[in-house]
Amino acid sequence: MLVTSPHQLAITVRNQRKQMQISQADVADRVGLRQETISAFENKADRTKLDTLFRILAALNLEIHVVPQGTKVSGWDKEW
C-alpha cells in the first residue's frame, strides 16, 4: 500500500491491528509500551517518535519500504 502521510500510516497500522484481532493493549505489551502510546499513534501519528513507530510496526509484522516518488513497484495496487 502506498502511504504518503502520517495519518494514512496510522490508519494502515490500525487496520492491520484490527485484522489481526488484537487490542492496543496487546500491541503495547508485545513491545514494552503503554496502551496510551499506541492510541496516541493511531490518533496523532505525526507526533510519534521513529523508535516507537518501528516498535509498533514490528509488533504487527509490518515493515516500511522507501522508494523514490513515482516509482512503480509491483504488488502495490492501492493508493490513498
Image: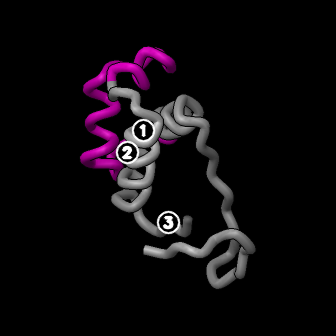
Task: Give the number of the mark in front: 1 or 3.
Answer: 1
* Span of residues in magenta: 25-50
- 49 or 13: nearer the eye? 13
Judged from the image, the secondary structure of the residue bearing numbered disc 2 is: helix
Q: Earlier in the sequence, mark 3 or mark 2?
A: 3
Question: Mark 3 packing: few (<14 Cα in 10 Å), some, or many (20+)?
Answer: some
Label pair 2/1, CB-CB below 8 angstroms: yes
Q: CA distance from mark 2 to mark 1?
A: 5 Å
Q: Quadrant of residue 39?
A: top left
Q: Amino acid at mark 1?
A: Arg
Q: Position of residue 75 (x, y in %)?
A: 69, 69
Q: Residue at x 43, y 54 (%)?
A: 12
Badge 3 vs badge 2, beta-carbon distance below 8 Å: no
Q: Which residue is mark 1?
A: 17
Q: Residue furthest bottom?
A: 70
Q: Report which residue position mark 3 lands on.
A: 3
Residue 27 location (% of width, % of height):
43, 25
Task: Please provide percent x and percent y for residue 56.
Answer: 49, 34
In the rendered image, residue 53 lying in the magenta stretch gets the answer no
Q: Which type of secondary structure does the marked residue at label 1 adopt?
A: helix
Give the residue furthest to the right.
Answer: 74
How crowded pointer 1 is (Cα within 10 Å; few <14, some 14-19, many 20+) is rated as many
**Amino acid type for the residue under numbered disc 2:** Arg
